[in-house]
């Protein structure tokens, strides 16, 4: 009996027939296997294709278009073909060699630098025009109309639209003029980063200026007479005066003229709005002084001076224009007392002179009528006299004074807090926050001016824009 063969010496099962494996392969693979197995002298090695040709072949094999087959050149994007990718011939595969193709070679190319989505373009323009700061503009014209004693109307709306256009012209022109400086200090801005072309920003500034002047002309000649120097001031500040000692004064003049534009368009005169314009200009001067060092920081004097100016302005806003209101209120009382004294003296004279003739009594009666008529002519203008500068607005109520004081306190708190942080730590970040706080503090300042001119409801409606501006400022910078 034959002993069993150990397991380690048992012959292995035969491998499946090569033909069974070849049947599972395609035609090209079978042809290549036959070329390897054919006897004869060694064939000359196939020429190795260039790397770019290898990338092209494999990209075609994976279904990408010629743009990606070139290796994902700059400014091109892969194009996916609609149908299945064709299988290359055996000779074409052999020409590529058996080297592995890196995955990065067939990776879809990045989007070109000049191509952006509509959302990205809108965000770039929102940053260029500083969209959150736009909400501080309508209050200028409304405060001017309130100072003139006129309710907002069609011409006031035209003044608001003109102010918005001129303000945005200044924003676009500011970045165009500072494009070289921003390329070093703030390369993320729309112009240095290439998201907006400088020519487009300059064209936008010109278009906004033309639109602002056209809207002011529709509001009347007085409005155009104020809008024209306002436009000149904006262009002079951005192109020439910004980096000079006259820069803050020019910016303050532009903001004051913006308020006077509302008064000129609404009432045809700017005289009643001079005091509010000076207060608004003082605030703008302080903010501009701080903004001159917002990129590099390191200045404690500017935030400290702005804090002192803010405290003084808040005190003046809380006090209000009381002198003119007192004189206007004392006019009717003085006229009434004069009329009563005249009537009493005439009564005593008539009782004493009872024996006078009828002609004398008639003359005395006519004289009394003339006196009464004169006193009535004095009272009527006094009742319709302007409260602050010659308007027909009645004396302010206690609610108006309460709104005015509350808005003045909100103005001081909104600007003094970031200024205090900038004084303690004058870093660029805190300085920019102080500038942004000063820009947003314009809204309660305008509301306080409206309430001081006898329009508290308009001031409260204007303050409703402050939360919108603050929320938008979290997404788009105001500086």
Image (spheres, helix red, strand yellow):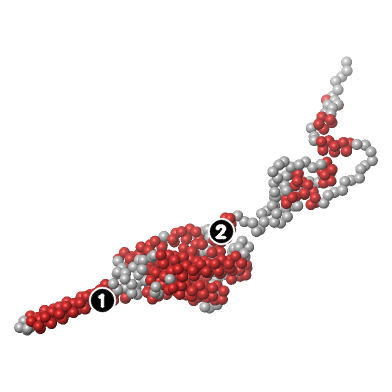
Q: Separation of disc 1 and disc 2 at Cα? A: 57 Å
Disc 1 target residue: 331
Foreground pick, 95 / 358: 358
71, above or below 186, in the image: above
Label 2 Cα crowd, 10 Å radius (few <14 / some 14-19 / many 20+): some
238, above or below 120, in the image: below
| Helix, strand or loop for disc 1 | helix
From this viewpoint, which residue is outermost toward the right? 41
Of callouts 1 and 2, the N-terminal one: 2
Give the image location of residue 388, x and y in percent.
34, 73
Question: Which residue does the image show at 30% across and 66% down from the upper left?
Answer: 397
Tell me the quadrant of the picture where the N terminus can be found.
top right
| Helix, strand or loop for disc 2 | helix
Residue 299 in view, yes or no: no
388, above or below 104, in the image: below
Give the image location of residue 240, x and y in percent.
56, 76
């Amino acid at each position: 009996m034959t002993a069993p063969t150990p397991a380690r010496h048992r012959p292995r099962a035969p491998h499946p027939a090569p033909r069974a494996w070849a049947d599972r392969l395609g035609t090209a693979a079978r042809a290549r296997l036959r070329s390897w197995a054919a006897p004869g002298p060694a064939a000359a090695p196939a020429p190795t294709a260039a790397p770019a040709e290898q990338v092209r072949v494999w990209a075609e094999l994976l279904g990408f278009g010629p743009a990606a087959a070139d290796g994902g050149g700059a400014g091109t994007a892969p194009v996916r073909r609609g149908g299945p990718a064709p299988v290359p011939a055996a000779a074409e595969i052999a020409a590529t060699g058996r080297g592995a193709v890196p995955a990065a070679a067939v990776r879809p190319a990045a989007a070109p630098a000049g191509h952006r989505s509509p959302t990205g373009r809108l965000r770039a323009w929102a940053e260029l025009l500083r969209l959150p700061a736009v909400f501080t503009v309508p209050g200028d014209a409304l405060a001017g109309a309130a100072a003139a004693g006129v309710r907002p109307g069609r011409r006031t709306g035209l003044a608001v639209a003109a102010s918005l256009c001129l303000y945005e012209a200044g924003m676009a022109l500011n970045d165009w003029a500072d494009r070289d400086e921003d390329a070093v200090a703030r390369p993320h801005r729309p112009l240095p980063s290439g998201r907006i072309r400088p020519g487009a920003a300059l064209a936008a500034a010109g278009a906004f200026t033309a639109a602002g002047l056209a809207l002011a002309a529709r509001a009347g000649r007085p409005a155009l007479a104020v809008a024209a120097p306002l436009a000149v001031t904006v262009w002079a500040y951005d192109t020439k005066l910004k980096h000079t000692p006259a820069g803050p004064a020019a910016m303050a003049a532009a903001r004051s003229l913006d308020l006077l534009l509302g008064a000129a368009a609404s009432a045809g005169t700017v005289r009643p709005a001079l005091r509010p314009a000076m207060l608004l200009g003082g605030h703008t001067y302080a903010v501009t002084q701080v903004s001159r060092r917002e990129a590099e920081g390191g200045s404690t004097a500017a935030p400290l001076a702005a804090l002192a100016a803010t405290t003084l302005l808040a005190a003046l806003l809380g006090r209000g224009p009381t002198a003119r209101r007192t004189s206007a209120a004392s006019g009717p009382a003085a006229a009434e007392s004069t009329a009563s004294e005249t009537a009493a003296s005439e009564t005593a004279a008539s009782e004493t002179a009872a024996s006078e003739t009828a002609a004398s009594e008639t003359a005395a009666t006519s004289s009394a009528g003339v006196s009464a008529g004169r006193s009535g002519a004095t009272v009527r203008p006094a009742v319709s006299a302007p409260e602050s500068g010659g308007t027909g607005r009645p004396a302010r109520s206690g609610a108006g004074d309460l709104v005015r004081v509350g808005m003045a306190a909100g103005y001081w708190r909104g600007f003094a807090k970031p200024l205090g942080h900038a004084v303690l730590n004058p870093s660029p970040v805190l300085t920019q926050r102080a500038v942004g706080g000063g820009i947003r503090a314009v809204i309660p300042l305008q509301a306080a001016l409206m309430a001081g001119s006898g329009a508290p409801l308009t001031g409260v409606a204007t303050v409703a824009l402050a939360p919108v501006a603050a929320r938008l400022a979290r997404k788009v910078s105001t500086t």
